[in-house]
Image (tube, rainbow, N blue to C red):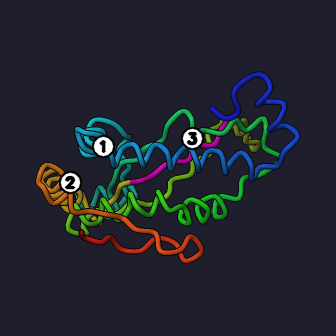
Amino acid sequence: MIPKAGLSGTFYKIRNDDVLFAKATSNLAGQLGYLQNIEAGAQAYLELNGTMSLGNPQNLVEDPTSVPFGKTYSWSDTEVDARYLSGAVDVNSVIENIQKNSKFNAFKSYLNEGSDQMLDVVPYVRENGSSDNEERAVSSVNIGIKLCAQSRDDFDAGFQAFKAWERSNMRDNFRPMEFDKNKGFSLFSQD
């Protein structure tokens, strides 16, 4: 959890919320970079971890393949301790910052390409806390990713395509390139 005890806790107490979320976004980018490059492939981690995230429960009763369906992933080093936050979390701002991160965009393109565009990766932000009557106390804020598709069937088909793609030599042809940090991430190139 961010911050860790000791001096970093004191440092973050005198800084603003942006610094905490910048650190969490940086840690998220590191996790995604690691997943993209592990020898066993990202599919091994993504299949065995994460939390199922279903669409609207009412829609699920009417149609078990309702939209959207996915899995959420977050890590302990992408969780922000709310005691160090100054106030309410601007979730939209956090999501925008994650979407601007080049490693997030590289991972998103990697998953899109490998799944034949059936899977998408979107930022995930959740406030954790408890409620007493009308008062809600936030204890931490998780940031991470949600791997999603339009339906459960699309998710399963996209994930199977991604597994096959990662196991093939097509994975070796994926080369994300950054043309200009200000312009963001481009499509991949093949050498």
User: Does residue 5 belong to the magenta stretch?
Assistant: no
User: Which sits in the foreground, 89 or 167?
Assistant: 167
Percent across and percent down for residue 111 are: 30, 59
Residue at 25 percent across and 41 percent down: it is: 47
Disc 2 packing (10 Å; few <14; some 14–19; many ≥20): many
Residue 6, compared with residue 146, is above or below; it is: above
User: Which sits in the foreground, 135 or 99?
Assistant: 99
User: How many numbered callouts?
Assistant: 3
Residue at 44 percent across and 60 percent down: it is: 122
User: Does residue 142 belong to the magenta stretch?
Assistant: yes
Q: Are marks 1 and 2 in contact (CB under 8 Å)?
A: yes
Percent across and percent down for residue 109 are: 35, 65
Q: Amino acid at mark 2?
A: Phe
- The residue indicated by pointer 2 is 159
Q: Which residues are magenta?
A: 140-146
Q: Are marks 2 and 3 in contact (CB under 8 Å)?
A: no
- The residue indicated by pointer 3 is 78
Could you tell me which secondary element the residue under label 2 belongs to?
Answer: helix
Q: Is residue 37 visible in this depiction of the protein? A: yes
Chain-order first, disc 3 or disc 1: 1
Residue 41 position by quadrant: top left
User: Which sits in the foreground, 72 or 111?
Assistant: 111
Marks 3 and 1 sit apart, C-alpha to C-alpha, by 17 Å
Marks 2 and 3 sit apart, C-alpha to C-alpha, by 24 Å
Chain-order first, disc 2 or disc 3: 3
- The residue indicated by pointer 1 is 46
| Magenta part, dominant SS | strand
